[in-house]
Image (cartoon, rainbow, N blue to C red):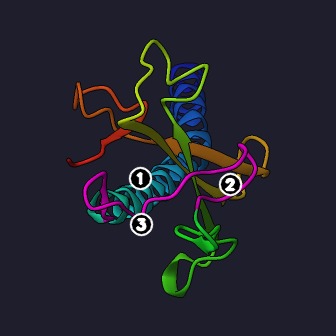
């Protein structure tokens, strides 16, 4: 009878230690999910600002701008329309955000689409991964929206209004 009790205690101890080792992993996953949700919110907020920017052919108004290269923020004339934000204010201090806008009329276009009336917008939100399991380096998440298919989150295309 003593042997059976000792075996039962050993089995319960092994089960409890396995459960205890899963708690930090679950905590890290919840924290990463919260950071990813915040990054998604920040990207969606910036995309709404971009969507609201005026860009029309007649009259010629461009408050959207274009990026000269993948490394530069968009400009319209001498004005940076959506400058890089290396550190966001307030509760989002651990996040940075940048916008790149490409002209779909210039070769190679935007994927399979080449049109001077379209621009591709990419919002990149970067944040530092938390402590815990895995590397603690910066994480980059690119968020965008395809006007042709709202279920696909790849690229924002804006049409110039006539």
What label sits on residue 40 in the rendered view?
A: 1
Dot 2 lies on which element?
loop
Q: Magenta span covers which residues? A: 53-75
Q: Is residue 151 left or right of residue 69?
A: left
Frontmost residue, 91 versus 24 = 91
- Which residue does the numbered mark 2 point to in the structure image? 129
Q: Is residue 109 left or right of residue 58?
A: right
Q: Nearer the viewer, mark 2 or mark 3?
A: 3
Q: Nearer the viewer, mark 1 or mark 3?
A: 3
Q: Quadrant of residue 128?
A: bottom right
As measured in the structure, the alpha-carbon distance from the residue carrying label 2 to the one carrying label 3 is 34 Å
> What is the crowding at mark 2: few (fewer than 14 residues within 10 Å), some, or many (at least 20)?
many
What label sits on residue 63 in the rendered view?
A: 3
Q: Residue furthest front?
A: 59
Q: Is residue 18 above or below residue 99?
A: above
Q: What x and y, as percent, mark residue 136?
A: 78, 51
Per the image, is 69 magenta?
A: yes
As measured in the structure, the alpha-carbon distance from the residue carrying label 1 to the one carrying label 3 is 24 Å
């Amino acid at each position: 009878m003593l042997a059976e009790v000792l075996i039962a205690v050993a089995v319960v101890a092994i089960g409890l230690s396995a459960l205890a080792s899963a708690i930090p992993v679950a905590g890290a996953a919840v924290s990463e999910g919260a950071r990813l949700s915040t990054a998604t919110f920040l990207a969606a907020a910036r995309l709404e600002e971009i969507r609201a920017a005026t860009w029309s052919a007649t009259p010629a108004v461009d408050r959207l701008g274009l990026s000269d290269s993948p490394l530069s923020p968009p400009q319209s004339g001498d004005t940076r329309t959506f400058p890089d934000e290396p550190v966001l204010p307030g509760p989002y201090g651990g996040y940075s955000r940048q916008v790149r806008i490409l002209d779909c009329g210039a070769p190679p276009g935007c994927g399979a689409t080449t049109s001077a009336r379209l621009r591709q917008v990419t919002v990149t939100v970067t944040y530092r991964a938390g402590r815990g399991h895995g590397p603690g380096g910066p994480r980059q998440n690119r968020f965008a929206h395809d006007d042709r298919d709202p279920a696909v989150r790849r690229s924002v295309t804006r049409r110039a209004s006539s």
